[in-house]
Image (cartoon, rainbow, N blue to C red):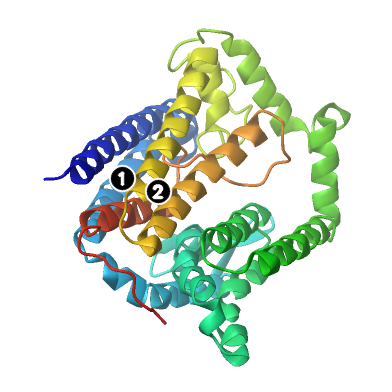
Amino acid sequence: MGPREIELQKTSKLLILNFVVILAIGITMVYSSSYLFGKENFGSSTFFVSNQLIFLVMGIVMAFVVSQTKFDFWLKYGSYIHYFFLFLLILTLFPKIGLSVKGAKRWIHLFHITLQPGEMIKYTLIFCCLPYFEQFNQLTVRERVLYAIPILMPLGILIKQPDFGTFFVCFMVIFFVCYMSSFSRKYFYGLLIFGGFSITGALFLKSYRILRLLSFLDPWKNPKTSGFQIIQSYLGFANGGIFGQGIGNSNEKLFYLPEAHNDFILSVIGEELGFLGVSSIIFLYLFLVYLGFKLAMKLNSKWGMILVSTIIFTIGLQAVLNMAVVLGLLPTKGLNLPLISYGGSSLISNFFAIGLIFSAVKNTLKLEDKVYT
């Protein structure tokens, strides 16, 4: 075994350990932040943590299966998986199939199963972006237009739902893959400018987004309505201080902070574990990104390097956006904290992505760059 293989194994083990620590914190804090809500609304204090454990087992099984498959398989057929989840994403817009929660149609309910397709789209989008940008110069004009449809269509649907948070993540995934690929820099910067104007336009297209932005700038202007959630988040961090109130002793989860076990779970962590706890979470994500990029740079295949680094970028981006929201640095976007917040679709999709990482690592010595269409 050569130095590269030894380094790959060492980095992989550290990355797995990092994932395990984050997941352990996640399970603990899901229970701590949800047991009263579960008892009050579902008659069981373990309702949410039990579901999260089931999702965790399903995710581990998925990650293991994906990690054991040939990475070459995902490069060849991953686009078909994207088409499938794109179809599910379209179904969210249909009455009686798509579920509307707080005015957003982000979920579908089929065969007693509730799914949020946008969570998986964040990762399956890579399967279409990678060959498109890497082989752009070899495509005809017709092929460039045709292959761009499954890349751009999810963005339009996510705006329609609306789910601006997932829209922004998918938008950044597209541009990250584009930047990492052999795509022309001249075209890239042109698309970047066009994309920036498009996001700005989408942001101000609806009045509720403008209201959300204004609430973010001054939440105390409407403390009982649009500013309520972020103010409660501030109070959670303020109550936590340096060392926190202790696990289970949060006041904000006593029906003050909406989505305490989901989008705003970091606020509960801040109140119960204090500044040190929040700092530890930030360090774990930074270390995850460092290890992931380090792993990606050691892969033989450029395609594998781009896919792994994009997955790590996507997880890190979601963590940054969630933390920025609960700290009041960005308007609320409806994005959870990866691997920590409650949610089956999010957890399972992240495990799918983790499986892809280790599939690439496992096959790196055998993988050669090919042409995939």
**Percent coordinates x, y for residue 318 in the rendering:** 55, 44
Residue, disc 1: 56
Q: CA distance from mark 2 to mark 1?
A: 7 Å
**Percent coordinates x, y for residue 89 in the rendering:** 54, 70
Seen at 53% across and 14% down, the residue is: 274
Q: Amino acid at mark 1?
A: Leu
The C terminus: image quadrant = bottom left
**Percent coordinates x, y for residue 254 in the rendering:** 56, 24
Residue, disc 2: 347
Is 245 located above or below residue 68 in the figure?
above
Q: Amino acid at mark 2?
A: Leu
Seen at 71% across and 30% down, the residue is: 328
Is 262 located above or below residue 245 in the figure?
below
Circles 2 and 1: CB atoms closer than 8 Å: yes
> Mark 2 vs mark 1: which is more N-terminal?
1
Q: Secondary structure at mark 1?
A: helix
Other residues around mark 1 within 10 Å, as few (<14) / some (14–19) / many (≥20): many
